[in-house]
Amino acid sequence: MTDKFIFRFVAGITVFVIAVVIVLNRHLIPGPATPPAFTPYLPLLNAILNGTCSILLLTSLYFIKQGKITIHKRLNITTFCLSSLFLVSYILFHYLMRNDTVYGDIDGNGLLSDAERVAAGSSRTVYLYILVPHIILAAGVLPLILLSFYRGLQMQVQKHKKLVRWTFPIWLFVTLSGVVVYLMIRPYYHFN
């Protein structure tokens, strides 16, 4: 496969995934009137998957620094699979949920009253300062992950190393901040 083909393939996957997330997150395709009983468990599952990926990424870094390429590869394949499972779960959750969760929305009406805004205080600002880069970097890291993964599997070590210098810290930030975002928004989920 040529680099040109790989870049087009990665670009196509990235555009497709981002489009699906936007369409479902904006509820352009409405989900069911009553979400299935497992829906409330998806955010926790997503946080567990993100946390596990964080640990696996750090463990993978440790093993590659020890020169243990096979373990490094296996950990990264596992991380890639878990991140893919996360993506499916994330998309499913946003498809199934009819209402967006708003940080500070205590009564679950989807609107932030003045009283709710005051009650949330500066923690809402902290939440948004974590959420916004999390979202932007989550979208931006996908092509880096795919290209790094490809270069690594092809044993194109120098190209892999150059990409991973960017991919690793961004991917780690996205997985760690995903857990933090979940812990912060969890009190405001309303599944009724």
Image (spheres, grey):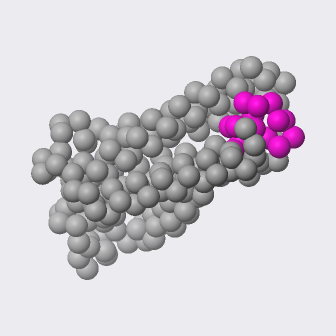
Of residue 55 and residue 17, the one placed in the foreground of this image is 17
Of residues 147 and 174, the one drawn nearer to the viewer in this rendering: 147
Which residue is rendered at x = 24% and y = 48% of the image?
Answer: 96
Q: Would you say residue 69 sits in the magenta stretch?
A: no
- Image coordinates for residue 107, horizontal then vertical, percent: 17, 63
Q: Is residue 83 left or right of residue 171?
A: left
Question: Residue at 74% across / 20% down in the picture?
Answer: 70
Q: Is residue 103 above or below residue 94?
A: below
Residue sitting farthest toward the right: 158
* Quarter of the image that includes the N terminus: top right
Count of number-bearing discs? 0
Residue 84 is situated, as x and y percent measured from the top left of the image, at 49, 37
To which quarter of the image does residue 98 belong? bottom left
Task: Tell which of 15 and 82 is nearer to you.
Answer: 15
- The residue depicted at 58 percent of the width and 27 percent of the height is 78
Asked if residue 10 shows in the view, the reply is yes
Q: Residue 157, image x and y in percent?
A: 84, 35
Residue 153 shown in magenta: yes
Q: Main secondary structure of the magenta part?
A: helix
Q: Is residue 38 left or right of residue 19?
A: left
Residue visible at 39% across and 46% down in the picture: 90
Is 125 situated above or below 178? below
- In the rendering, at what x and y percent does residue 49 appear? 47, 36
Q: Which residues are magenta?
A: 147-160
Left or right of 187 in this view: 48: right
Res 134 visible = no
Q: Is residue 189 above or below residue 132?
A: above
